[in-house]
Structures are given as C-alpha cells and as structure tokens.
C-alpha cells in the first residue's frame, strides 16, 4: 500500500507541474507522442480489451493537461495507435515508440509524455509491471533515465 500511496502523491505532483507547462506543448508531435504513449499503456500486456480502451479514452478526453487539444482529434489518434497495436502488437509498439522518440530533441515535452504515461498507467489504482515496462521503453526512446521516474 505504501507504494500506491507514494505513486498517487508523485502522480499528483506530476499533474500539477504539467498543467503549468502544457501551453508551450501545443504541437502535433506532442499530441501524437502522448496518444502513442497512452495506447502503449492500454496495450501494455500485449492486448487491448474494449473496456480498457474505453476507460483510457475517457481519461484522455477528460484530462486537464490534454485539454489544450480538441478531444476528438486526441481520440482519433489514440484509436489509430490502438488499432495498430491490436492488429500487430510488435509492429504497433515499434511505431508508437518511434512516435514518442520524435520528442527526444524536446526534453521537456518528452518528460511530459512520460509523466502522462505514468498518470494514465496509475489511474486505475494499479501501475502494473507491464505498464512500467512500457513507460521504461518510452524513457529509453527519448534518452531519459527511467530512474528519474523511480522506474
């Protein structure tokens, strides 16, 4: 339980930090990287069940941090990445990670995408090993040490 309490506290801190920075992140690469990260979290165990996809989509469209983007555009992009992952998980994962990797030259935006992945992963009260591994993969793709996020 201590781990979960620590994760909730850290997630709240991340959300607060991100809210102050999101205005400067309003660009296509950030939106795409964020939706790729969310799809990776939804598919972290190798499959995306419809309920998990629905819940993740609801979190995306109601998230304050992502409110700088039109919800329908985010939903369409999230669905696009989910469809790729559902059709061929390995290929879809490579494509999603490559999208996140495009933010490597923008470290603030890359960190924000990682933080959003952690927030989405922990939203159900269980930031499991598969979700942590997906976030670690994204960290490596953008050149950020996973230890920066206690992963």
Image (cartoon, rainbow, N blue to C red):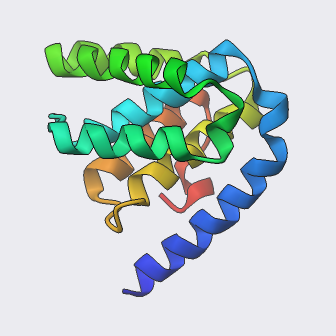
Residue that appears at 43% across and 36% down: 38
Total labels drawn: 0
Please state the horizontal and vertical placement of residue 33, each as a whole percent of the image: 55, 24
Determine which quarter of the picture holds residue 81.
top left
Residue that appears at 46% across and 33% down: 37
Residue that appears at 19% across and 35% down: 48
Q: Quadrant of the N terminus?
A: bottom left
Please state the horizontal and vertical placement of residue 70, each as a whole percent of the image: 62, 24
On screen, residue 146 above or below 82: below
Residue 23 in view: yes
Residue that appears at 36% across and 43% down: 56
On screen, residue 6 above or below 112: below
On screen, residue 130 above or below 101: below
On screen, residue 120 above or below 53: below
Residue 103 in view: no
Determine which quarter of the picture holds residue 23.
top right
Side of 12 relative to 36 (left or right): right
Q: Which of the pair 24/62 is nearer the observer?
A: 62
Please state the horizontal and vertical placement of residue 118, each as a whole percent of the image: 49, 52
Outermost residue toward the bottom?
2
Please state the horizontal and vertical placement of residue 123, each as a whole percent of the image: 42, 59
């Amino acid at each position: 339980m201590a781990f979960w309490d620590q994760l909730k506290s850290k997630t709240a801190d991340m959300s607060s930090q991100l809210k102050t920075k999101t205005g400067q992140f309003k660009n296509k690469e950030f939106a795409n990287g964020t939706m790729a990260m969310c799809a990776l979290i939804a598919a972290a165990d190798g499959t995306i069940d419809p309920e998990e996809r629905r819940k993740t989509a609801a979190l995306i469209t109601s998230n304050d941090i992502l409110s700088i983007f039109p919800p329908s555009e985010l939903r369409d992009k999230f669905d696009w990445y989910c469809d790729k992952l559902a059709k061929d998980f390995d290929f879809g994962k490579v494509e999603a990670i490559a999208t996140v990797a495009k933010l490597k030259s923008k470290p603030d935006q890359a960190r924000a995408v990682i933080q959003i992945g952690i927030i989405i992963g922990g939203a159900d009260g269980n930031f499991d090993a598969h979700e942590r591994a997906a976030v670690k993969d994204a960290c490596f793709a953008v050149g950020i040490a996973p230890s920066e996020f206690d992963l």
